[in-house]
Image: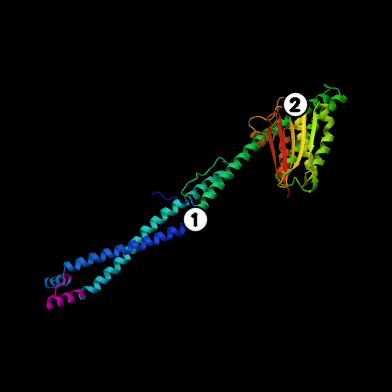
Amino acid sequence: MRLPRFKNLSLATLTAIVIATMLLLSVGMAYVGVNWYSAYLDDTINSNLPPEAATAYKDLTEGRVPDGAGVKTLVEHLNAQDAQTDLQIQLAALVCGLLSALVCAIIGIYLARRIARPLEDLTVAAEALKSGDFSARVAVSTSNTQEVSSLVETFNALATSLDTMEKRLRFNNMAIAHELRTPLTILQGALQGMIDGVFPMERKIISDLLLQVEGLGRIVEDLRTLSLAIGHKLVMQRQPLDVAQVVEAVVAAARPMLEERAFEIETALKPATILADPSRVRQAVLALLNNASRYAESGRWLRCETESLPDGSVVIRVLDRGPGFPEDMDAVAVNPFWRGDPSRSRATGGTGLGLSVVQAIATAHGGHLEFNNRPEGGAMVAIHLRPE
């Protein structure tokens, strides 16, 4: 038995329709059964009439005047059968009512199980999800009600999100271990060599080890920033802020570093005021400049822009003429440890967390991070900040 499609019906409406249908079916079946049995009794009584009563009954049904004696016999016979006939009709009504109720109950149970089956599937999938199987999904059916369809879609979306988070967490744990292993190995080897007398206690060696410690500190600080973003504690104090002035100050502070790498720096800073956390905005802009100085060094050109948009939001853009982003840009967005050039990123001091930190800061300000490859070559990264 195939159910009609109930996707556009609510569960309350469907329940009311099923109950009303079962009631009408029950009454209809009882009515048909009692009528049939009444006709059967009439035929039985007529077939058992005495001859003169049967003749009188036939004359009455055909519109002729019956014989008086025959009519008297017919009336006496019918009166004698009244009590027994009433009892049989009452029993027939009771039996037909019970049978119709039983049939409707069986049909109702079947329909209820069909309606509740997605909930049973949801329960099984939820148990699998609880046990750690994030691949559990529930098939979407066109016969589900609005509430069940919405619940199934929400559950599948939740399971997909948990599956993605679990895979990302697994990858992040491996990436963190990979990022920490190299500097820790260098520190351990050098310190052990000094203790064993293999390496001298020279200032140059200690200075190199300090660079490794500073690299570990940057990784820890970036991870702390991402943790604050997850806990919605990244932006604590907002104040009126002209992002053009902030970007100008950050560019001025980073200019010696950029000029040392032979970068040509351009700015187009239009006034753009918004409620924002100045320290986080500075952190985001500096992270973009550091990221560009490492991965766009071949282009030797950077341009910073600020602009206020009609919807009240502001945008900060950093453009370069480097190699740009890979074709799979989704990896840049979802991979916190993405590196544009894995072969030299560690040598240049990057943690791989730069864009993730910037994205977290933009999200904490109600905005988002946009990145694209420029048609003329290079990359464009934009921080969109929205008012509260």
Q: In the image, what residue occupies the spot 41% across and 56% down?
A: 108
User: Quadrant of residue 270 in the image?
Assistant: top right
Residue 349 visible: no
* Disc 1 to disc 2, C-alpha distance: 62 Å
Residue type indicated by callout 1: Leu
Q: Secondary structure at mark 1?
A: helix
Query: What's the residue type where badge 2 is placed?
Result: Gly
For image coordinates 41% across by 53% down, the residue present is 110
Residue nearest the observer in this picture, 270 or 136 = 270
1 or 2: mark nearer the eye = 2
Please name whichever residue, 20 or 378, is drawn nearer the observer in this view of the structure.
Answer: 378
Q: Main secondary structure of the magenta part?
A: helix
Residue 86 image point, x, y percent: 27, 71
Span shown in magenta: 61-78
Looking at the rendered structure, the secondary structure element under dot 2 is loop
Q: Which mark is residue 11?
A: 1
92 left or right of 180 in image: left
Magenta span includes 72: yes
The relative height of residue 253 versus residue 235 in the rendered view (above or below) is above
Quick one: label 2, few (<14), some, or many (20+) residues within 10 Å? some
Q: Is residue 60 in view from this perspective? A: yes
Q: Which mark is residue 299?
A: 2
Q: Judge whether residue 187 is colored magenta.
A: no
